[in-house]
Image: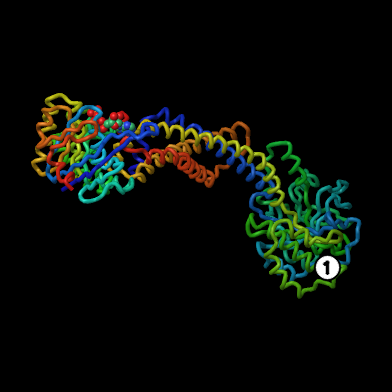
Amino acid sequence: MILELKHVYKDYLRGKEPVPVLQDICLSVEEGEYLAIMGPSGSGKTTLMNLIGCLDVPTSGEYLLDGKAVGELNDNALAELRNHYIGFVFQNFYLLPKMSAVDNVALPLLYAGVSQKERRERAIAALEAVGLGERINFLPNQLSGGQCQRVAIARAMVGNPKLLLADEPTGALDTASGNQIMEIFQQLSDQGMTIIMITHEPSIAACAGQTLHILDGQLLTGAENQEDCHEA
Amino acid sequence: MENIRLACQGIWGHKMRSFLTMLGIIIGIASIITIVSTIQGTNEQIKENLIGAGSNVVTVQLYDGEWPADFSYNPVPPQVRPIDDIMHQVLESLDGVDQVAFYTQRSWPDGVYVGSTSFSGTLYGIDDAFLNVESYRVLYGRCFQQSDYDNFRRVILLDKKAVNTLFPTTYPVGQVVEIKGEPFTVVGVVEQNNGFKPKISSMNDYQLYADTSSGAIFLPSVMWASVYQFDEPQNVAVKATSTDDMTLAGQNVADALTASQIISTGQPMASDDGMGMDDSNMAVPEGDTVGEEVTAPEGYSYQSEDLLKQAQQLQEMSSATNQQLIWVACISLLVGGIGVMNIMLVSVTERTSEIGLKKALGAKKRRIRRQFLTEAAVLTSLGGIVGVLLGIGLAQLISKTNGIPVAISIPAILVSVVFSILIGLLFGLLPAVKAANLNPIDALRRD
Ligand SMILES: Nc1ncnc2c1ncn2[C@@H]1O[C@H](COP(=O)(O)OP(=O)(O)OP(=O)(O)O)[C@@H](O)[C@H]1O
Ligand SMILES: [Mg+2]
C-alpha cells in the first residue's frame, strides 16, 4: 500500500464560511497501480490531487503516504516528502522559462542536495529516456508543447519518486503529442511506477489500468480501491 | 554561489528596471563617498600645513599664566630652575619622545646690526641638537661644531631670509653681524629641510601661515648669556617618534618640566626624587584635561604648543558641516532601500508561479528566502559599487574644479559596499519572507 486516504474531508473558506470541496474520500492505492481520475469541472479533482501530492493537508481525516501520516507535517517536512516521493506533471508544464531543458529537469535533484555533476548526468539520462537527448540545452520556448511536457515528465522522474501525479497531462496537447505522452506513461507503468492521472478524455483514461469517478467532491462508490476503508 | 549567478541573470534580464532600482543606492553611496573624500582631503591638508609634513616637532615653552613668558624686559623668575643634563635624558626617555633640543629665542631683538641695517627677525640661542631636531641643513659654509661651544666662539648661522635682508648682495659666510655691540662671524647659511611650505589655497590659509616667515639668526646657546647677561629658561623642541605621537610627546615633556623645573610657591619643592614617579604619570595624559590640572592659573608652567591639537580643531570644524551632509545622503540610501523593497515585492508577485513550482518540487522555505535575499543584496551591492565609482569620479571632479583636496579612503569604500549589502538584506527581508511563505497551491493556481 503506497498511499491510503481515510475519510478525508477538505473545506475551503469562502469568506468566513467553509465550503466543502472533498467529502469523505476513502482511497487506497497499491504500489505499481495506474489509476485515472475523471469527473466534471469543479468536482474537486485538482484538490484531491493536491492532497495526494502533499501540496496541501486535509481538513479532517487521515492521509498515509508510504505509512507516514501527512496531516501533522509542517511546510518543510512536506517539501522534503514531495521531493522524495512524488513527481508532478501539470497541464501547463510549468517549466522555468529562463532555464535550459536539462537545468529544468535537474531542479528536484538540486533540492535533494545532489552534487552538480551527478545532477547533470541524471538529468541528461532522464531526458534521453523521454526521447529528448538531443535537445538538452534548449530553452522551453524553443520546444513544442509535447516536448515541453516530456521535459516535465523527465523532471518528475529524475528523482526516482514512488508516485507520479499528473493533472491533465494531455489537456494542452494535440492528439498525437498526447498519445506520445501516454506511451511514456505506459512504459513507466510497465517498469512498476505508481501513476495517478487526472483527465477529461475517456480515450486517455482508457490507457490507465483503472478509472475512478468523482462527482461534487465524492468518489463514486463501487470501486474496489474504496472497499476496505468503508468496511473498517 | 548558484544563487548569486541566478540573481545576476535576473538583474541582467531587467536591465532598465534594475538600474532604476539601484539609482537611490547609487546616489546615496556616491554622495557619501564624495563627502567623506572631501573631508579626508581637507583634514589631511590642514594637518600637513600646520605640522609641516613629517618633521614631527612640537615646541614646549615656558608660560607665565596664559602667555609665553617674555624676558626682554622682565627678570628671570627665581622659581624656574635651569634644565640640566639629567633632565635632558629624562625627557628623551618619555613616551612618544624621540629627541629634544633646547633653545632660547628673542623676536624683534634690539641691537642686531649689519652696518646700519637692523635685523627684525628672530634670534635663537641653540644647543648642538637643535638644527638636527628641526631638520636644518647647511647651504653654505659650515654648521656649529663642538669647539664653537667649548671655546665660546662668537659665531652665528643665518637662514636664507636673514641673508636676504642682511646681505642682499654679498656672500654672507665670513661677514660680521653686530649683536649688542659684539661682533659675530657668520660661519654658515642653513635652511629647514622639509620646508614648511603650506599650500595656500585661500586668504584664510595665508593669514594662518604668514607669521612663520621672518628670518632667523642662530648663535650657540653658550653665547646667549654673554649677549643677554644671564641664562634664560629654555624652550624645548621635541621631536616625536611619529606624527600621531606629537600631542603625547609635547604633553609629556611639558608636564615633566612643569613638575620638576618649577619650584611651586605653595608646596615644598618638587625635587628630583619626584622624577621616577613622573614617568608613570606620563602614561596617563590624554588630550586637554592634563594641561588644566598641571597649569596653575597664575605662575609659571611649561606648555606644549600643540599643532596637532590645533589641526584637530580645524578639522573638526570642517567635518562638522560635512557630517550633516552625510545624514542627508543616508536618507537617500533609505529611500533607495525602500525602492529596492518595492521592486522585490513586485518581483515576488511576478514570479509567484515560479516560486510555487519550486516549492512543489521540494524547495524549502529557507532556499526561497535565500534566493530573494541574495537577489536584493546583489542588486544593492552592485548599486553600492557603482556608487563608489561614481563618488570617486565626482570627488576628483570637485578637486579639479574647486581646488578642494580629496583623499579617497579605502575604509570608507569598504564600509559603503558592506553597508549597501546590508541595506539589500534589510529591505529584501520582507519580500523574501513573503515569497517563502507562499502557498504552493495558490501559487500554481495563478497562471
Ligand atoms: N483555494 C481555493 N479557495 C476556495 N475555493 C477553492 C479553492 N480551490 C478550489 N476551490 C473550489 O473547489 C472546487 C474544486 O476545485 P478543483 O480545482 O479541485 O476542481 P477540478 O475538478 O480540478 O476542476 P477542473 O476540471 O476545472 O480542473 C471548485 O468549486 C473551486 O472553486
Ligand atoms: Mg483541475
- The amino acid at mark 1 is Arg
| Furthest residue toward top | A174
x%, y% of residue A224? 12, 41
Q: Is residue B200 above or below residue B284?
A: above
x%, y% of residue B203? 73, 36
x%, y% of residue B147? 75, 66
Q: Residue B2: which quarter of the image?
A: top left
Please state the chain letter of the residue tagged with numbered disc 1 in the rendered image: B
Q: Depth check: B219 or A190 in front?
A: A190
- Residue B376 relative to residue B267: left or right: left
Q: Residue B62: which quarter of the image?
A: bottom right
- Residue B286 relative to residue B10: left or right: right
| Furthest residue toward bottom | B273
Q: Which residue is mark 1?
A: B81
- Residue A141 relative to residue B58: left or right: left
Please rate how many residues cluster around mark 1, counting C-alpha atoms within 10 Å: few if below 14, some from 14 to 19, many from 20.
some
Q: Quadrant of the C terminus of chain B?
A: top left
Q: Residue A61: which quarter of the image?
A: top left
x%, y% of residue B119? 84, 48
Residue found 15% across the figure and 39% down from its top: A195
Residue found 68% across the figure and 45% down from its top: B316
Residue found 66% across the figure and 59% down from its top: B240
Q: Quadrant of the N terminus of chain B?
A: top left
Can residue A140 be seen by looking at this rendering? no
Q: Is residue B339 above or below residue B191?
A: above
SS at mark 1 in the image: loop
